[in-house]
Image (cartoon, grey):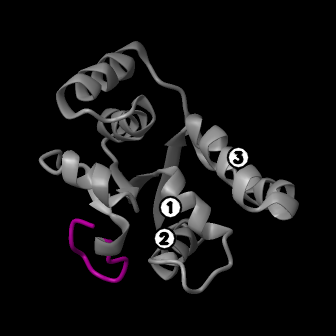
Amino acid sequence: MKWYVVDASVIIKWVLGDESEPDQEKALNLLDAWVNGTVELSAPTLWQYEVGNFLGRELHQDASEKMKLLLNLDIKSVDLTSAMFDRCFVWMRQKGITFYDASYLAVAAETGADLVTADKKFTNRMREKDRICLLNDLDMGSDSRY
């Protein structure tokens, strides 16, 4: 079974309810695949803080309801190990990325999963890392790598 790590940029698309949101359909297809048991999903525990922060800032009245929906999905949360912390710090120095972004990729690298993100800037900075898939490039209907 294919295993993906999803970051906050993907998770948020599951509850936005805005059809004009770029790649929302792809994000929902990934969620459907997970609900149907055809893929595995996980994320570092950080996702809850990043998504909660976004929801509280942007969807004021609906933040609590949307967060409860996401928490009820019971996404497998992965705590970072010492090796993952070290990997994050290396990428921060080498690539100028945030610890937050690096943590999602570290979980993917450690678990053998592919990171799915809607963050094109991050993807471009880390492009040579073969465990990153830009959400826009995700094809749930094919047997391709992503």
* Cβ atoms under marks 1 and 2 closer than 8 Å: yes
Q: Is residue 3 above or below residue 37?
A: above
> What is the residue that sits farthest to the bottom in this orientation?
19
Q: Compare marks 1 and 2 and give the one earlier in the sequence.
A: 1
Q: Secondary structure at mark 2?
A: helix
Q: Is residue 64 in view?
A: yes
Q: Mark 3 belongs to which amino acid?
A: Gly
| Magenta part, dominant SS | loop
Which stretch is magenta? 138-146
The amino acid type of the residue labelled 2 equals Leu
CA–CA distance in space, label 1 to label 3: 13 Å
**Which residue is denoted by mark 2 in the rendering?**
30
CA separation, marks 3 and 2?
21 Å
In space, the residues marked 1 and 2 are separated at their CA atoms by: 9 Å
Residue 80 percent location from the top left of the image: 47, 24
Q: Is disc 2 surrounded by few (<14), some (14 to 19) or many (20+) residues within 10 Å? A: many
Residue nearest the observer in this picture, 129 or 3: 129
Is label 3 in a helix, a strand or a loop?
Answer: helix
Look at mark 3 in the image and give the residue it sits on: 52
Q: Quadrant of residue 65?
A: bottom right
Residue 46, relative to residue 74: is it above or below? Answer: above
Considering the image in quadrants, where does the N terminus appear?
Answer: bottom left
Question: To which residue does mark 1 refer?
Answer: 10
